Structure formats: structure tokens, C-alpha cells
Amino acid sequence: VMLLVDAEQTYMQGAIDHLALNAMARHNRARSVVFNTYQCYLKDSESRVARDAERAEREGFVFAAKLVRGAYMVQERGLA
């Protein structure tokens, strides 16, 4: 079974990222089980992916990601 954690509006995303990365650290030891979603229309998406991948390498778990264009582009145009 795999778990793909979906992305939401930016005001909720920090908490979702925190939960998803902690779940990865616990369950992604030998293979990818938990995936976090990164909305690539956001200006900080590249740095967030890099930061989370570095954490996975440092802590010894498998980093798993789903990259999407983003469902909230219109609502959050100022952040894009």
C-alpha cells in the first residue's frame, strides 16, 4: 500500500508537509510508501523539494514526491 499525501492551499501546507515528512521518516525505510505532493507553480517549490530531500538523506529514509502543476493557481496567483 502507498499513501500519496495531497497538497492544499499554502496556509495549510506547512502542517501537511510536517506530517508527511514525519510519516516518510517512519515508513520509508526500505522503499517508498509515503509520498508528499509539491505544487510546482509556487515560487518556493524547488527549495522545499531540495530541503526535504536533504532531510531524507541526512536521516536515512527514502524521499518520495509527487510533483503537480497545482490546483490552486488561480486562487493563489500572487504566490505563483
Image (tube, rainbow, N blue to C red):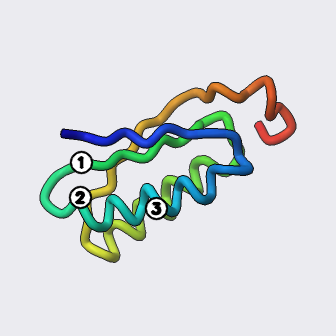
Name the residue furthest left: 30
The residue located at (76%, 36%) in the rendering is 80
User: Marks 1/2: CA distance?
Assistant: 6 Å
Q: Amino acid at mark 1?
A: Val
Residue 33 is marked as 1
Classed neighbour count for the residue bearing mark 2: other residues with Cα under 10 Å, few (<14), some (14–19), many (≥20): many
Of circles 3 and 2, the one toward us is 2
Q: Which residue is mark 2?
A: 28
Q: Which residue is mark 3?
A: 52
Query: Split into 4 quadrants, where in the image is the N terminus?
Result: top left
Residue 44 is marked as none
Callout 1–callout 2 Cβ contact below 8 Å = yes
Classed neighbour count for the residue bearing mark 3: other residues with Cα under 10 Å, few (<14), some (14–19), many (≥20): some
Q: Amino acid at mark 2?
A: Asn
Q: Position of residue 32 (x, y in %)?
A: 23, 49
Q: Secondary structure at mark 1?
A: loop
